Image (cartoon, rainbow, N blue to C red):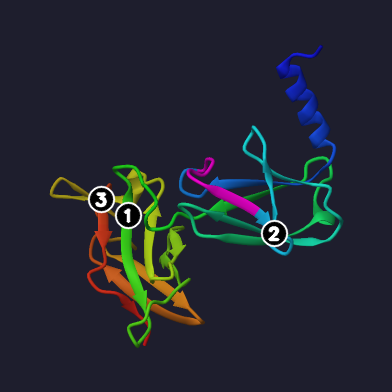
Amino acid sequence: MPTFDEYLIFLDEKIATSVSLAVISIDEYTGKQPIGYVNVFIKSQNLKAIENRSGHYIFLNLANGEYAVRIESEYYFDEETNVKISDLDPLNPVVSIKLKPMPFYPFPPGTTLIRGMVQDSGGNSAAEAKVEVIGKEVNNKTTNRGDFVLYYKVLTEDDIIIEDNKRFVKGNGDKTVHLKATHDSRTKTADLEEVEECKTTTLESPIIFS
């Protein structure tokens, strides 16, 4: 009679033979598995994935075709991507999807953050606007309320300006950090005079599209 561990190995091998798609969700901030609740499903069929012991979300016995894979989660923006089964390696049908943290994500102490709000000319929230630090690979989008958080993952000494024993993020050569918001083909810029390392800097007023 097989042991429990042998049964699990047998079960994993059996499932592997019928896997059509395996989705790996990645926390864009940490580069690791997401925290909190995560739901991966095929939108058109409302077919929920099976999470295995290694953190893969798998779909079994899918017919050839294109599927809209959607991820909804507790601390991240929803993500959706189209996957064509025929484009995948049948021996390793893996797709990686990065998840961007929402403003209420529990960033650890010492994270360098920029928080703010984006609105239209009528003072309404600009949802799903893209906000980025110009010249840096730091970007995110806004919630339905128009708020956003930008996070620096790794800062080296080349990214820092030291003044009065304080460490500030370098913009384009000085302490000024330039932001750009994009929404419905419209763009708007805003400047922060300084962003201190390991602190949260908040825009004093919303970025408003005219």
Q: Name the residue under label 2.
A: 46
Q: Is mark 2 on a helix, strand or loop?
A: loop
Q: Name the residue under label 1.
A: 113
Residue nearest the observer in this picture, 191 or 48: 48
Is tag 2's residue or tag 1's residue first in the polypeptide sequence? 2
Residue nearest the observer in this picture, 181 or 136: 181
Is tag 3's residue or tag 1's residue first in the polypeptide sequence? 1
Q: Is the magenta stretch mostly helix, strand or loop?
A: loop
Residue nearest the observer in this picture, 5 or 156: 5
Rendered residue at 82%/52% (across/down):
62
Rendered residue at 51%/82% (across/down):
185
Residue 103: give x, y in percent of width and height.
38, 58
Q: Name the residue under label 3.
A: 199
Rendered residue at 15%/45% (across/down):
165
What is the quadrant of the N terminus in the image? top right
- Residue 164 — which label? none
Mark 2 → mark 1, Cα distance in angstroms? 36 Å
